[in-house]
Amino acid sequence: MRKKLIDKSKCAGCKNCELACITAHSKSPFPFITSGTDEIIQARNKIELDAEGKLFPEFCRHCDEPSCVEACISGALIKGEDGLVVCNQEICIGCFMCVMSCPYGMARPGIKNGRCMVKCDGCHGRESMACVDACPQRCLSQVDTEDELNGQVIYV
């Protein structure tokens, strides 16, 4: 069970989490130099303003009962045993039922030819989450077991 704890009070809106996400999911060692490539960079998270006008990082919550998985007609979205909701881009048909069903707006159309959806995958397959590693304010932290939560509220 990999979860992300977020302390919204520490977020400075630096967007390092977005840049780390782009880099972690890019096929290029230099994702911001796109000359001649057809890869389009897109973060799977975003920095938002809350109701009080304060910045906070927004991520997929990998819900216990994800409506995006239920809505996915191709079977591209699955919730794995590790608790992460991931999309198999090879079978995503771009119907965007997941986009319409996500109550948090975290399933989004991919900007590369709009064929597939993109969302935070919890850095599935990586040792640690890129956004957590890149956060200079330490407002993001990763927990891997229930014991590590210590009664804290989990956000993702």
Image: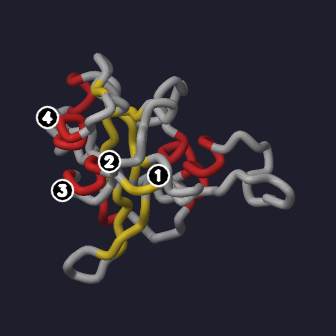
Q: Residues within 10 Å of mark 3 (few under 14, many from 20)?
A: few
Query: What is the three-letter code of the residue carrying label 4?
Result: Glu
Residue 143 placed where, x, y %?
A: 34, 31
Q: Earlier along the polypeptide chain: callout 1 or callout 3?
A: 1
Q: Residues within 10 Å of mark 4 (few under 14, many from 20)?
A: few
Marks 3/2: CA–CA distance: 10 Å
Quarter holding residue 75: top left
Q: Which mark is residue 65?
A: 4
Instruction: Note whether 129 is above or below 48 in the view shown.
Output: above
Q: Earlier along the polypeptide chain: callout 1 or callout 4?
A: 1
Q: Earlier along the polypeptide chain: callout 3 or callout 2?
A: 2
Query: What is the three-letter code of the residue carrying label 1?
Result: Arg
Q: Residues within 10 Å of mark 2 (few under 14, many from 20)?
A: many
Q: Residues within 10 Å of mark 1 (few under 14, many from 20)?
A: many
Residue at 42% x, 48% y is 117
Q: 103 or 96: which is nearer to us? A: 96
Instruction: Note whether 150 is above or below 7 in the view shown.
Output: above
Q: Which mark is residue 103?
A: 3
Residue with the most extreme bottom position: 53
Q: Which residue is mark 2?
A: 60
Residue 36 placed where, x, y %?
A: 86, 57
